[in-house]
Each structure stands twice: as structure tokens, then as C-alpha cells.
Image (tube, helix red, strand yellow):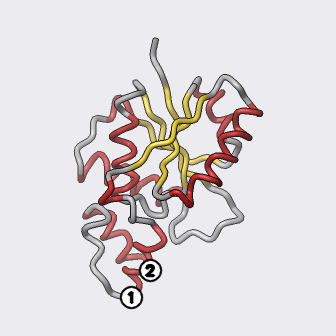
């Protein structure tokens, strides 16, 4: 039985923390769909299309991931609807710290109410990557700091071009 998982997020931009979660998720699903949220109520540095491109460049060009078990798409509907559309039975959620858990726990509960056939799996990235957040990466970049330990080379270029 093939298991498809969906890893939804804003990925503004994708960091090594996200990438670590992707590596771990690929150990438990046969196919992973990285779903880039296009929630119009948020203020993003990059458009959804740019974020999809950042992820594709980071994974396929910089890190040489295999394309056959990964798909990167934008979305702007319920994650459970996306799961139904792609026949995904697992939602992958990354946790950085205990403070993330309460929100993620409530979100998982709501998703369960919307579709009790979909399981949410929480994944922690490596301890050294847990402090990385897209928000801090953007802030460090805006202030002229080095971000190469947080994001891939192509992502650095996209951030520098945008700021």
C-alpha cells in the first residue's frame, strides 16, 4: 500500500529545519506533497509561486533530492481537502519547540474532526536545526547577517535579490 503524506506550510522561505522534516517524512511515506500555503491573510516576503520555486531549487538543484517521490504545489484551501484530492492519509507537521505544540495539537484536532481518516504526524527536526525559523532567517538577512547555515545557496540568492 502506497502512503501519501502532505507537508503543508508557508515556507517563506524554506530552511534546513524544513528540509530535515522532509527527510524524516520520506522515511514513513512513499510520496510526499509539499503544500505551500497561499493564505491571503498573511504578509509574505515571497509569492506562493516564488516559494514553490525556492523549494524546488533547494531540494532538486542544491541537495539533489529524487523527484519521483516529491511534489511541490501551492494551495489555498483546507489541508484536509488537499488530502482528499491527492488521496493522502497523513499530514506531516514540524515542531521546533514546546511552544509550537499547543497550536499544532488544536490544528490536528480540527483536521481530525473534518476527516477522521487522516492522521497527523508531528516531527521534530535535529536539535541543532530546531531554532531555525523563516522569520529569523529573513530578519538576519535584512540586517546583513550571514544565513548560509540556515538555508541553501539558491535560497540565499533569492532572499538577497528580494531584500
Q: Is residue 84 above or below residue 71?
A: above
Foreground of the two, 26 or 97: 97
Q: Quadrant of residue 2?
A: top left
Q: Position of residue 23 (x, y in %)?
A: 33, 40
Instruction: Give the residue pinned by disc 1.
Output: 143
Query: Is 131 left or right of 40, judged from the image as shown?
Result: left
Q: Quadrant of residue 148?
A: bottom left
Q: Position of residue 119 (x, y in %)?
A: 59, 29
Q: Quadrant of the C terminus?
A: bottom left
Tally the numbered discs.
2
Instruction: Give the residue pinned by disc 2.
Output: 139
* Badge 2 density bin: few <14, some 14–19, many ≥20, Cα 10 Å: few
Q: Position of residue 50 (x, y in %)?
A: 47, 60
Q: Which mark is residue 112?
A: none
Q: Position of residue 150 (x, y in %)?
A: 31, 65
Q: Residue at x 69, y 62 (%)?
A: 40
Q: Residue furthest top?
A: 1
Q: Residue furthest bottom?
A: 143
Q: Is residue 17 above or below residue 114?
A: below
Q: Residue at x 70, y 37 (%)?
A: 111
Foreground of the two, 135 or 100: 100
The answer to the question of whether label 2 and label 1 lie on touching residues, with beta carbons closer than 8 A, is yes
Query: Is 136 left or right of 85, judged from the image as shown?
Result: left
Q: Is residue 99 above or below residue 23?
A: below
Label 1's element? loop
Q: Residue furthest front?
A: 98
* Badge 1 density bin: few <14, some 14–19, many ≥20, Cα 10 Å: few
Q: Is residue 125 above or below residue 40?
A: above
Q: Residue at x 30, y 60 (%)?
A: 128
Q: CA distance from mark 2 to mark 1?
A: 6 Å
Q: Residue at x 66, y 22 (%)?
A: 117
Amino acid at each position: 500500500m502506497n502512503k501519501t503524506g502532505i507537508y503543508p506550510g508557508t515556507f517563506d522561505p524554506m530552511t534546513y529545519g524544513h528540509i530535515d522534516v522532509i527527510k524524516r517524512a520520506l522515511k514513513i511515506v512513499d510520496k510526499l506533497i509539499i503544500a505551500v500555503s497561499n493564505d491571503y491573510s498573511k504578509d509574505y516576503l515571497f509569492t506562493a509561486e516564488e516559494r514553490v520555486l525556492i523549494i524546488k531549487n533547494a531540494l532538486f538543484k542544491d541537495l539533489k533530492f529524487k523527484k519521483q517521490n516529491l511534489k511541490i504545489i501551492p494551495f489555498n484551501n483546507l489541508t484536509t481537502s488537499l488530502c482528499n484530492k491527492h488521496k493522502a492519509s497523513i499530514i506531516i507537521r514540524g515542531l521546533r519547540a514546546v511552544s509550537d505544540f499547543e497550536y499544532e495539537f488544536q490544528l490536528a484536532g480540527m483536521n481530525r474532526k473534518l476527516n477522521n481518516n487522516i492522521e497527523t504526524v508531528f516531527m521534530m527536526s535535529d536539535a541543532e536545526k530546531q531554532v531555525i525559523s523563516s522569520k529569523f532567517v529573513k530578519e538576519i538577512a535584512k540586517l546583513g547577517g550571514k544565513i548560509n547555515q540556515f538555508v541553501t545557496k539558491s535560497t540565499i540568492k533569492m532572499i538577497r535579490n528580494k531584500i
